[in-house]
Image (tube, helix red, strand yellow):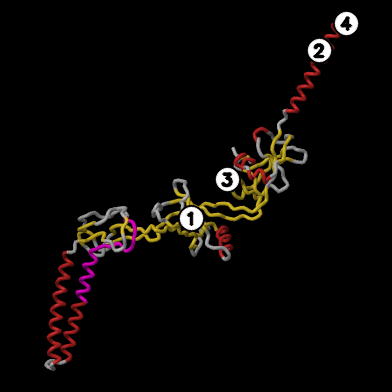
Amino acid sequence: MKRILMLMGLCALLCHTGCESKKEEKETETEFLVTSPVRKDTTITEDYVSQVRSISHIELRAQERGYLQKIFVDEGQFVKKGQLLFQIMPTLYEAELQRAQAEANFAQIEYQNTKRLADSSIVAPNELAMDKAKLDKAKAELALARVHLQFTEIRAPFDGIIDRFHVRLGSLVDEGELLTELSDNSKMWVYYNVPEAEYLEYQSKAHTDSKMNVNLLMANNKQFEYPGVVETIEADFDNETGNIAFRATFPNPKGLLRHGETGNILMSVPMKDVLLIPQKATFEVLDKKYVYVVDKDDVLRSREITIAAEMPHIYVVQDGLSENDKFLLEGLRLVRENEKIHYKFVKPDSVMSQLDLYAE
């Protein structure tokens, strides 16, 4: 009898322990967060590889042959319009100018003498006209000699920055030889290529909106502080790439941008009535994006989705989801395909407003 009572007590204890274990397991069952896509208008930022160019970038070449006698500036120096940069040995042209001046003076004296005689009717008017023609020719040759002498001085045609020198002091330079380049960096032209579809979208808004503002992401991954304006579109598409070149103009008051730099143009593109989901809710298999959709029986089903665009923490979904679908927001590594879950639904607007909190 005593043994029977002990066995009954042991059975009761095991039964109580099992019930407590099941109760505890039920109480600690994982509750997952689930939400739905948001449909709304948004704006995405497209980036395009770009090349930075000065609004004026020219070659400075020798206009006369001779030895480079003086260099008045240094590489990388900012110069003002009209500033003297180089001087080619002017000795020969100075001598030509002196000869032309002497011939002009002689012709002037001859003309004055002939004019006095003509006024006294001593010589014929034709002789006076001949001396006048000689004087005009001498003056023209004098002006030409002055021009040749001026060509020995290379001056800046506009304010800008001197590039590296291609010749050195004392070099014998030929007419037309490259001395250096000069860049006007007060404003910069930034060129980038846009696909045909995006060009058509831009043109459809060009009649109603003002010129498009864009930003420049520099090579150090920092955004240039001054925005630019799209002012020009090239005439033709590139048949090989299907792109067309845009040109944006950027102010450059601090001179940070230089000719030849590279970067990325950041252009805002509006998107109407699109579906948005958090990036955190997706997983990738063989370069394809998926989400776990919760069906009517609270069972998880993986579903492939197509991404139309990407923003910080957000994907724009092109295909694969509807507004009424529910998908797993977090804990994707804790679940399996066809698993039934216990979940809490979070309103989509609340999820989107707290993406920084949800992001890993």
**Horizontal side of residue 149 vs 190, given as left or right:** left
Q: Which sits earlier in the primary sequence, circle 1 or circle 4?
A: 4
Determine the CA span between mark 2 and mark 3. 61 Å
Image label count:
4
**Horizontal side of residue 111 vs 191, given as left or right:** left
The x, y position of residue 308, in whole percent, is 61, 50
Q: Amino acid at mark 2?
A: Leu
Q: Which sits earlier in the primary sequence, circle 2 or circle 3?
A: 2
Q: Image height check: is 270 above or below 129?
A: above
Determine the CA span between mark 1 and mark 4. 95 Å
Q: Which residue is mark 1?
A: 227
How many C-alpha atoms fall within 10 Å of the one at disc 4: few (<14), some, or many (≥20)?
few
The x, y position of residue 163, in whole percent, is 32, 54
Q: Which residue is mark 3?
A: 312
The x, y position of residue 148, in whole percent, is 22, 68
Q: Amino acid at mark 4?
A: Met
Q: Which residue is mark 2?
A: 10
Give SS at disc 4. Answer: loop
Residue 202, visible in the rendered structure:
yes
Q: Which sits earlier in the primary sequence, circle 3 or circle 4?
A: 4
Numbered badge on residue 1: 4
Give SS at disc 3. Answer: loop
Q: Amino acid at mark 1?
A: Pro
- Which callout, 3 or 1, points to the residue nearer the camera? 1
Which stretch is magenta?
140-162
Residue 154 is one of the magenta-drawn residues: yes
